[in-house]
Image (cartoon, helix red, strand yellow):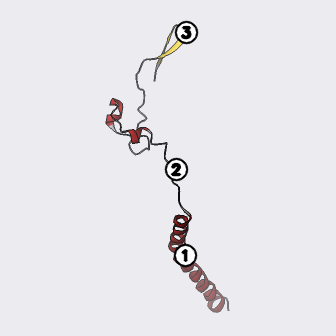
Amino acid sequence: MTMNKVNDEFKDDGRTVADMDIPGMPWYAGPNDRLGDRPKAKRNCLVEERIVLTKGEKRAIYKGIIAAILPLVLAFAVGYFFIFLFLDKVWLS
């Protein structure tokens, strides 16, 4: 924005030098945003409600995380075991 010095105060003349409203960014609301038609949810997108979970819900989330990660960890562990077994028995002997 350019500013004009008037009466020892800076006054905004309203011109835009570079539009920082980039599609895909969290604060982008689309072309209607400049007209004030933005929905209330978009207006306060950075203010979110805190989600409160019960102990059972937290436990279910943790079980789901373990169920998703455990097969991958076991696959890598078995793979490393066979690699070291190969190195010990075949290559290094």
Please name the residue shown 53% across and 55% down the image.
52
Residue 32 place in picture, x, y as percent: 32, 35
Name the residue carrying label 1. Answer: 70
Report the quarter where the N terminus lies.
top left
Question: Where is the C terminus found, in terms of image quarters?
Answer: bottom right
In the image, residue 55 above or below residue 80:
above
Amino acid found under the numbered disc labelled 3: Asp
Q: Residues within 10 Å of mark 3 (few under 14, many from 20)?
A: few
Where is residue 73 shown, x and y percent of the image? 56, 76
- Mark 1 lies on a secondary structure that is helix
Image point (41%, 21%), residue name? 14
Q: Earlier in the sequence, mark 3 or mark 2?
A: 3
**In the picture shown, does residue 51 fall above or below 75?**
above
Amino acid found under the numbered disc labelled 1: Leu
Can you identify the residue that label 3 sits on? 8
Ranked by sequence position, the earlier of labels 1 and 3 is 3
Dot 2 or dot 1: first in sequence order is 2
Q: Is residue 37 left or right of residue 10?
A: left
Q: Secondary structure at mark 3?
A: loop
